[in-house]
Amino acid sequence: MRDLPELRLAPPDRLTVALRGVAAAAAFAAASTLAPQSQPQVGALPSLQAVSSAEAANAGGAEFPDTVTLGGETLGLVGVGVRSKWMVKVYGMAVYQKTPTKKAAHLIGADEPKFIWIKMLRGIDGDKMRDAIDEGLEANVAEATRTAIAAQVASLKKAFPGEIPKGANIGFWYQPGRGTVLQLGEVDKARLPGKAFMSALWSIWFGKEPADADLKRSVLK
């Protein structure tokens, strides 16, 4: 992601900043809602059953369980890490797989149930997430593959709201034969078909030029 400078505000501006944060959270909740009567919290992902234990992990203050259950499949924790930019913590990440292995090639290529869980540690503009997706794919995925998955990438970027608030939960859930589901808050926002797309998406964090080398090392250590 691009530069995310620390906010250094004079005391009179704090109320304005707080109100903006509330507005961003409300906008994210609205973007994560399928029907007016369903007003989700910026919290747990809907189809996810998390099982905490003494082995639960912490990434920059974001806590993650050691196993999750999605679609009846129990996935084990591969590892956790923090995405930082200019020493600013942007989000905590946990990665889960049916057969957890500390190898980047396995994370990217295994055609099995897997899940990336992101918890935002600060609010960001949605365009920063969209830019990070483009930059990560360009750095790690061949042009021919990027062309082949262009429609899925466009749908993914379109699904993100204008602002992503602190505390938001984002999930990428892959099921063989069904594709990758983007989850925002409590709602499945997009289903993105194809193993090739999944491998490209996972390459953003675990390819040869990852978005954050420290995050990659932390997940795989």
Image: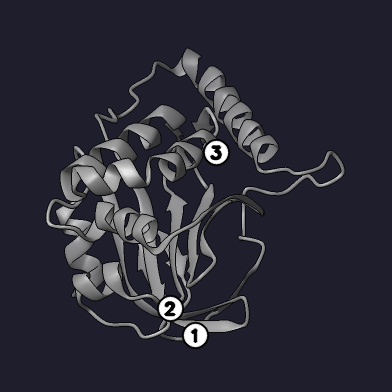
**Quarter containing the N terminus:** top left
Q: Secondary structure at mark 2?
A: loop
Please, is residue 70 above or below residue 89 in the view? below
Q: Which mark is residue 159?
A: 3
Q: Position of residue 219 (x, y in %)?
A: 26, 69
The correct choice, above or below, for 46 with respect to 143 in the image is below
Q: How far apart are the alpha carbons under marks 1 and 2?
A: 5 Å
Give amino acid for label 1. Answer: Ser
**Residue position marked by numbered label 1 in the rendering:** 53
Mark carried by residue 56: 2
Judge by depth and name the residue closer to the eye, 190 or 92. Answer: 190
Q: Percent position (x, y) of residue 213?
A: 15, 55
User: Which amino acid type corresponds to the residue marked 3 in the rendered image?
Assistant: Ala
Where residue 94 sits: x, y (%)?
39, 66
Please state which amino acid type lies under the numbered disc 2. Answer: Ala
Instruction: Say few, some or many: other residues with alpha carbon within 10 Å of mark 1 (under 14 / 14 to 19 / 20 or more).
Output: few
Task: Please give the name of the residue rendered at 53% of the width and 52% of the height, measured from the top-left corner.
Answer: 169
